[in-house]
Amino acid sequence: MLKRLVHILTPPFLFLFLLFFPLKAEAEEETGSLYVYFREEKVGYEEFSWKTEEFGYSLQVRGMMDKPIPLETKNLFIRLDRNFIPEYYSFLGAINGVPQYIECLIAEGEVQTVMRVAGHEERSSLKIRRDAFLLPNAIFSPYLIVSKKYGCSLENPIELSAYIVPQLEVPFQLELKEGAICTLVLKISSMTIELETDEKGSLRGLVIPSQNLKISSKRIL
């Protein structure tokens, strides 16, 4: 009799439990590496982790580069909401051997920044476009956010904005490369950057001809 009551009562109680205590969606994670080539010479690498979470996305990066700028990325972290709007940015590493830490809190396009360089701290505030992409100098994995948002689905050129952390905001144009499948062309100031992606928005590589840089998800022999 007791077992019968348990079977009868379990489904409605299970429904109420799920209603008031919903199961948390598991995060989906994509990991990968990017290899940096300067004038055909391998000069560095980046390892990244892209996570799709309940309330948005996150990107975490570590890596090293010798040329054209000596750069050590101990940890870079970007958090975005479900619309790819940036909410948080942090960088811990060294540029030209000088230790550096940058933290940005972003809300409705207002960036509150704390920067510590060689023991000195500086705080600043800046207004940027709410949907600006965070593209720090000499770190390439954040371009994954551009490819994740647009992938191969871009039909017409669009005007966007990039915040070059922690310096300034600049406009750029994004379009599909003519005659190429899943290659985005990013035109920023006098520079052109080609982003090779796929149907899932994964970043396969970048080419920056004006800086003799090629970044690839595969080692180039």
Image (cartoon, helix red, strand yellow):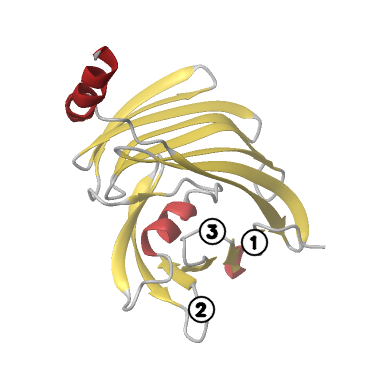
Circle 3 packing at 10 Å, graded few (<14), some (14-19), many (20+), is: many
- Based on the displayed image, in which of its 4 quarters is residue 94 positioned? top right
Mark 1 or mark 2: name the one nearer the start of the chain.
2
The front one of 202 and 76 is: 202
Left/right placement of residue 54 relative to residue 139 reads left
Q: Is residue 120 above or below residue 38?
A: above
Q: Is residue 129 above or below residue 74?
A: below
User: Residue, x 63% and y 44% (percent of image)?
Assistant: 46
User: For the residue marked with disc 2, what is the amino acid?
Assistant: Ile
Q: Residue furthest front?
A: 1
Q: Residues at badges 1 and 3 in contact (C-beta under 8 Å)? A: no
- Which numbered disc covers residue 213? 1
The front one of 201 and 130 is: 201
Circle 1 packing at 10 Å, graded few (<14), some (14-19), many (20+), is: many
The front one of 141 and 187 is: 141
User: Residue, x 47% and y 79% (percent of image)?
Assistant: 177
Q: Give the structural element (helix, strand or loop) at label 2.
A: loop
Q: Which residue is mark 3?
A: 203
Left/right placement of residue 12 relative to residue 97 reads left
Q: Quadrant of the C terminus?
A: bottom right
User: For the residue marked with disc 1, what is the amino acid?
Assistant: Leu
Where does residue 220 sit, x and y in percent of width and height?
77, 62
